[in-house]
Amino acid sequence: MNRDSLYIGGRWVPSAAGRTLPVENPATEEIIAHVPAGTAEDVDRAVTAARAAFDDWARTPMAERGAMLGKLHEALSARAGDIARTVGLELGTPLKVAKAVQAGLPLTVLRGYADLAANPAAEESIGHSLITHEPVGVVGAITPWNYPLHQVVAKVAAALAAGCPVVLKPSELTPLVAYLLLDAADEAGLPPGVLNLVPGTGPEVGAAIAAHPDVDMVSFTGSTATGRAVSHAAADRIAKVSLELGGKSANIILAGAELTKAVKVGVGNAFLNSGQTCTAWTRMLVHRSYYAEAVELAAATAEGYRTGDPFDEATRLGPLVSAGQRDRVRGFVERATARRVAGAAAVPEKGYFVAPTVFADVDPGSELAQEEIFGPVLSIIPFADDDEAVRIANNSRYGLAGGVWGDPDRALAVARRMRTGAVDINGAAFNPVAPFGGYKQSGIGRELGSYGMAEFQQTKAIQR
């Protein structure tokens, strides 16, 4: 693995400036690696390579692109153990979750795109018009630290399947797992320039990608504030943008729901990846008839989460990604005026840990209920009826995900009224081929499955 290099035009090459960025283990606070600090000049080299590769890759039949993605999947699957360990080291995800989610999910998504491209849909005809779907062009992919391979694969696999070369900037906090992907791409024989890697900071590399005149589309996942800046930069040249941004999802527990399961699954969802999940159900809305019992259950469940070494099988909650993120989350906890019912548990002195925390009687308009905290902090809010539950759930500038528990027909009726991109009823499993994305300030566009690939395509009508 050439962690001291960039990957541009099918080769490992040095960065123009020769500077590096440290990569920290958030569980131990130790520096575990250094990667190049890419520059705008490096981005220009990568975009040039992607542009040179575009015509041939776009003309490659989709079925052949699917076969190439299949080879990439095979090469990446052989690295599954390394993926889990790497994410455990650079992010602190507990090993069990790292294996199932941080390694397992992106491999599932990649396999799905390989299969989708290998069996392309027939072209559509409308009257005397032939409707074609063509690659949008060179894609700049800017990805976050919380699911550092899944978010990369969700963009890269979809773009490559659609016929678009990619310039990838992974998060500077968790860049190492991206090197495993590029190693696999090199082994699989992806054509030169089809996939390029430029690690670095957002203000340097991310900004250069977003503003580059030869980047036809920017696909960004991260904070709403940064997404706004990316959108502005791309708008100056009318480039296409896909944004997957923040969330403050509501988990509604209706009267008649299976309370114990709803609360325990809800707490687990809110605390997944130490709460560093954009879809996390961080607002638990409970019918008043269950409220007191739900608060007790949530508090007891949270107190049962053991924090510590991600490589200890008993650990359920790892560290936050950085000292800054830890301090930010602690700030929310310290400023809160709601009743704290869990969060006094001891955490390791070394590492960026926050105790699993639950607040009850949270004001729906308060900071706790409105801001994306991105840590293991759950707010519980009572409601009187379905209408009030929907009003509270929709009282957010975000709309990414959510949950509803109760009678299936009633829960479905409530789910239809929620202004959010995805809703799980009674704990239904995540579907990696269903469209994923948000309403309002949670983003623009969709990822995953055929909807995700369509984001990287232009639609043309040819009249005959």
Image (cartoon, helix red, strand yellow):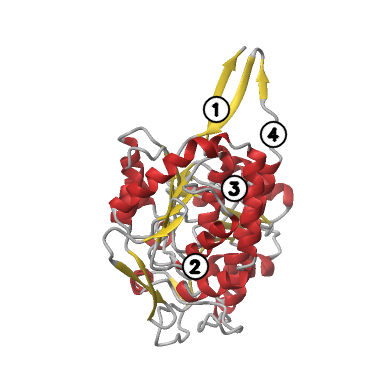
Gap between marks 1 and 2, in whole Å? 38 Å
Work out whether mark 1 precedes mark 4 in sequence or the reverse, and give the earlier one: 4
The residue lying toward the viewer, choosing from 376 and 164, is: 164
At x 52%, y 65%, the residue is 180
- Please say if the residues under marks 2 and 3 sit with CB atoms less than 8 Å apart: no
User: Mark 1 falls on what kind of element?
Assistant: strand
Work out whether mark 2 precedes mark 3 in sequence or the reverse, and give the earlier one: 2
Kindly report which numbered mark, 1 or 2, lies closer to the viewer in this rendering.
1
Where residue 51 appears, as percent x and y from the top left, is: 42, 40
Where residue 189 appears, as percent x and y from the top left, is: 57, 53
Gap between marks 1 and 4, in whole Å? 14 Å
- The answer to whether residue 388 shows anywhere in this view is no
Q: Write down the residue under mark 3.
A: 448
Q: Write down the residue under mark 1.
A: 459
Can you say whether 216 is above or below 401 in the image?
A: above
Q: Amino acid at mark 2?
A: Gly
Q: Write down the residue under mark 2.
A: 275
Image-based side of 169 in relation to 382, left or right: left
